[in-house]
Amino acid sequence: MTTQIAPEDTRDGTGVRIVLDHVSKVYPGSERPAVDDVSLDIPAGEIVVFVGPSGCGKTTMMRMINRLSEPTSGKIMIGESDALSIRPTELRRSIGYSIQQAGLFPHMTIRQNVGLVPGLLRWDRKRIAERVDELLDMVGLEPTEYADRYPRQLSGGQQQRVGVARALAADPPVLLMDEPFGAVDPITRSTLQDELLRLQSELRKTIVFVTHDFGEAVKLGDRITVLGNQSKVLQYDTPQNILASPADDTVAGFVGSGASLRQLGLMRIKDVELRPHPTVRESDSLDEVRKTLAGSEFDWVVVLDDRERPVSWVREGKLAHASTLAAVTESLDVVSTQSTLEDALEAILAGQHASAVVTGPGSRYEGVVTLDTLIDTITWLRASAEASTEESRGTAAP
């Protein structure tokens, strides 16, 4: 008889602590271990990111948590349970797993893909159907529109959202994510990162996330594990501390020369003041749009749909000879309140305004973040860093 994860570890789906105790992995025929005597304490309900060079063993170390790769030695605790005493198939059904390019089964519908693990756990059909609808809605995919499609009928970003939904289907306390957003374009990747942070603010899972992108690690991680060869832990700390005080030259190489700018990756748009900007509805007449602009100081306006979501924008100069509003609107890239200020800066530089449109819960319009706000924040961050450096020097002085 095998042990299962203790009921107290999974009773409400919230995260549990994971401890790797002197864990090693040696592949047959190899002279050197892929993972060499690693110990790590991952707090419950946090996102811990593994980052390191290709071939350093970061994916192997993560896969040992759900025993897709069996440890050669050491101990892994998930909550109060010894992972190595649990039947591997049972363990994997209690841990969510999301990989690059989603890994969806092409012959199954989206509903069948998401409901796979609950089905293996013998949930009844009604409960599975309700859970699938709940999760698709949670990741921003309307169930009535997407549930009966096949993966090939979805974009790469939509497939990745389904992959996250499938990983969350049985409400696991632990979610393992192996470069899940690495195969999508930068704009979609940023949106998916924001979505993950929004979900995490509600669900509080314990998430182990593997990436080779240090910027992604800074944005997502409550803590970052910088790994060297054989998964040697070079530094395990908060993003703030790693940016401020890299442990050695190797870690400093990951941080790079843009450390001061990366500080913008530590602050969320929700942490700064948003400014109002005039909006109109898709259904508004041209006269109504002109009237809105005439009463404002701006020469452009955000266009919202009937659910208060920004869908496009229109500049005043294009309204003079327009026949319909739809004929003169332009596509709009948005950031969310979960986005970082670095994301906002990139959106502003890529756009045609000195501001970026911001959405909140339900992708509804919240306001704009301006370039002036970012400049003020950078100035404040630089002054804070200088003050902290001076304080450290004063403390170190004899």
Image (cartoon, rainbow, N blue to C red):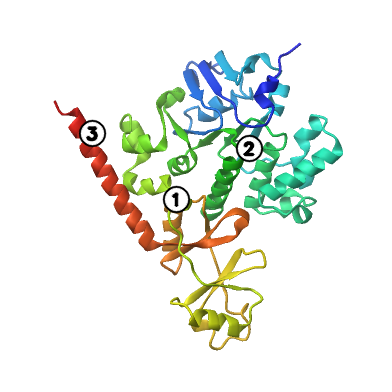
Instruction: Verify CB contact (< 8 Å) between mark 3 and mark 1.
Output: no
Residue that label 1 marks: 271
Residue 98's tag is 2
Q: Secondary structure at mark 1?
A: helix
Q: Quadrant of the C terminus?
A: top left
| Amino acid identity at mark 3 | Ser
Instruction: Inspect this view and state whether residue 349 appears.
Output: yes
Helix, strand or loop for disc 2 = strand
Q: Is residue 24 left or right of residue 115?
A: left
Q: Is residue 144 above or below residue 321?
A: above
Labels 3 and 1: the sequence-earlier one: 1
Residue 89 marker: none
Between label 2 and label 1, give the one nearer the viewer.
1
Quadrant in which the N terminus appears: top right
Q: Earlier in the sequence, mark 3 or mark 2?
A: 2
The answer to whether residue 236 is above or below residue 383 is: above
User: Identity of the amino acid at label 1?
Assistant: Asp
Figure quadrant of residue 69? top right
What is the CA distance from the residue labelled 3 to the residue labelled 2?
Answer: 42 Å
Tell me the quarter of the picture where residue 240 sits: top left
Query: Closer to the N terminus: mark 2 or mark 1?
Result: 2
Question: Where is residue 4 shown, x and y percent of the image?
Answer: 71, 18
Cα–Cα gap, marks 2 and 1: 29 Å
Q: Residue 389: x percent and y percent?
A: 24, 38
Question: Which amino acid lies under the numbered mark 2 shown in the image of this protein?
Answer: Ser
Helix, strand, or loop for circle 3? helix
Label 1 neighbourhood size at 10 Å, few (<14), some (14-19), many (20+)?
few
| C-alpha distance separating marks 3 and 1 | 26 Å
Where does residue 227 sit, x and y in percent of width and height? Answer: 43, 28
Q: State whether residue 10 is above or below residue 128.
A: above
> Which dot marks residue 392?
3
